[in-house]
Structures are given as structure tokens and as C-alpha cells.
Amino acid sequence: MVERPNKPSSLVATPGLPPQPTVSFSDDNSLVTATLPTGESITVLLYGATVISWKDSSSSEKLWLSSAAKLDGTKPVRGGIPLVFPHGFARTSRWEFLGKSTSESSGTQQTGDLSVKLDFGLSSAADGLDPKAKDAWPYKFNLIYSVTLNRKDLTTSLVVTNDDERAFDCQVLMHTYLKVNDITKVTISGLDSSSYVDKVDSASTKTQSGEIRIEGETDRVYTADGPVTVTEGGKTLYTVTRDNLSNVVVWNPWVEKAKGMGDFEPKDGYKEMLCVEPGSVGGWQTLEKGDAFEGAQTISLGV
């Protein structure tokens, strides 16, 4: 991101126009926050382009973030929405903020624009690329990551372009940590009859029967179509829809795993989080020279 000594503290609407979304930066330019006129907000850490906060109009947080998460660029963030590509370095690189755009389609004269999109970029030539990445994965590529906030939903989308002379294989995962109140009252629906790999049972392949309840350490990679709904105590909290992402990882560390992770705090935080992670991780996505891949998720509230 270009340093601007005299930059404004936020990007706001022209005087006389209806209320518009605002975009502000932290003093050290490490965080970008977008806020709708109605109060909804998102905050994105440029390290990893990690969404670390998503709040509704009443300031209720929708993403779980470990109290011990490192936000200084020393390690991937534990919580929020870490972005995984092609096998890790996207979340350990500093991305560039490319700008914002807004939509008037759902706005009114009273509330102004009710949608704001933040774009972030990372390429093989970027200064912020993890130095280890070029050795581990020596291809030319370009990534555009967009985070779009609406009043009742959040969309994250990634476009991967192969700028190399060679084909390359990659995987994509949006490692979303959803906040819940009590994991023992949570059910996940939409994956009935889907095949999955159970990573806590020797990576055996199984078929889901009925709704999912979290009753112990859970790490499953589902191959499925259609939306996934998270319900707590009979109330729908989230509905996750996917575009061109054939897999869903369902993850919760439970007691012992949480104890063993130094950046997972509080240790009983597993009771208040659930990872529902759209991705393309069941195999490898092959991109030929000049080809592009795009995948996205939309998380809707109470649908």
C-alpha cells in the first residue's frame, strides 16, 4: 500500500449527497475499516487480507477472533476469515489495498448506499509477498480479493490469474470462523448425503447422514452443492452460499486441540466458534498460462 503522509483519515461522501459508506485506515496503515450509513462494518488486516471483524447495525460481532491472535504480521491470524492460497502464503503476505466501490441499487435517499466493496491485490512481483513464497512456489500470478459488505450479508471473492508461461496447480480456502453463542446448541444443515473426508478418523471417506452437530473435535472436508445453514437453538444464524467452490470444511478444535494451540484463546473459545470454510481443496485446481479462476462465498444473516 502506498504510504501517504497527508492522507485523509477516511474516505467520505461529497457534501450534499445522501449518507455514504466510509472507509478509514489505522494510523499505521495496517487495517482498513468500511462502515455503512446504517452502522454495519468490516475490518480487514492487510497482512493476509484477513477480515478480522464483521459487525451488524447493532455492533454485534459475527466473526470469532482469538484474543491471542497475532495482528502484527508475525504469523497467520487465528480467527476472522484467513485466506488460503495456493497452500498457505496468501495469509502470510501483506496485500495492497486497491480501493473501494459502492452500490446504490439497494440504497434509499435516507440511508444512502447500502453496499461497499473493498479490493485487495497480491502478485508474484509484490513487495509484500512472503519471501519464502517464491522459493516454495516459483510461478507468476496475480490475485484480486474482494470483500463486499451489505446490510445483511458479507461476500468474499478471489480471482486467481496465471501470469506464468507454465501451468500451475493451486488450492483456495476461505477459512471462516463464525461466532456462535453455544456450540452444543448448533446444527449445520445442507450437507445431508454428501461425501466427506474425516480428518480426525484417519482421513476416511464417509457419507453425511442428517444434520451435523459438534460433539468433539471436528475436521471434515465435504464435497457438496447448495447452501449450508448454521442454526442455534432453532434460530438460523448464517446461511453460506458458494460460487465455484465445491468443498466445505467444517472445523472445531474442541477441548484438547484448543489447549494445544498457543494462539487459541480463551481455551474454551471453541464453545463460541464454528468454522464453515468454502474452498477448492478436495484436489488441485489447474490453471493454464493466462487462465483465471474465481471463487466466492456469501454469508447471509438469519436467512
Image: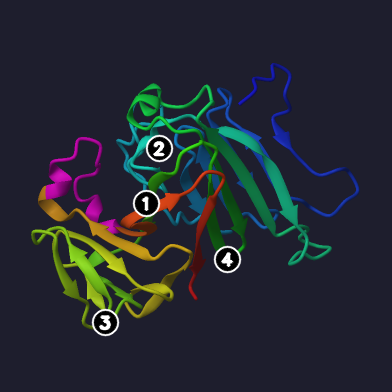
Q: Which residue is mark 3?
A: 193
Identity of the amino acid at label 4? Lys
The residue at which mark 2 appears reads as: 91
Kindly identify which residue carries mark 4: 152
Q: Is residue 211 magenta?
A: no
Say which element carries label 3.
loop
Q: Which residues are magenta?
A: 257-273
Gap between marks 3 and 4, in whole Å? 29 Å
Q: Nearer the viewer, mark 3 or mark 4?
A: 3
Q: CA distance from mark 2 to mark 1?
A: 10 Å
Would you say 31 lies left or right of 75 here? right
C-alpha gap between disc 1 and disc 4: 20 Å
Q: Is residue 74 left or right of residue 196?
A: right
The residue depicted at 22 percent of the width and 77 percent of the height is 208
Mark 2–mark 1 CB contact (< 8 Å):
yes
Other residues around mark 4 within 10 Å, as few (<14) / some (14–19) / many (≥20)? some
In this rendering, position of residue 23 left or right of residue 69: right
Q: Is residue 128 left or right of residue 24?
A: left
**Quadrant showing the N terminus:** top right
Check disc 2 and report its element: helix, strand or loop.
helix
**Discs 2/4, front:** 2
Location of residue 139 in the rendering, given as x and y in whole percent from the top left corner:
44, 33
Residue type at mark 1 is His
Residue hosting label 1: 175
CA gap, disc 3 to disc 2? 32 Å
Q: Between label 1 and label 3, give the one nearer the viewer.
A: 3
Inspect the image, locate mark 2, and give the three-letter code of the amino acid beneath it. Arg
The mark found on residue 224 in the picture is: none
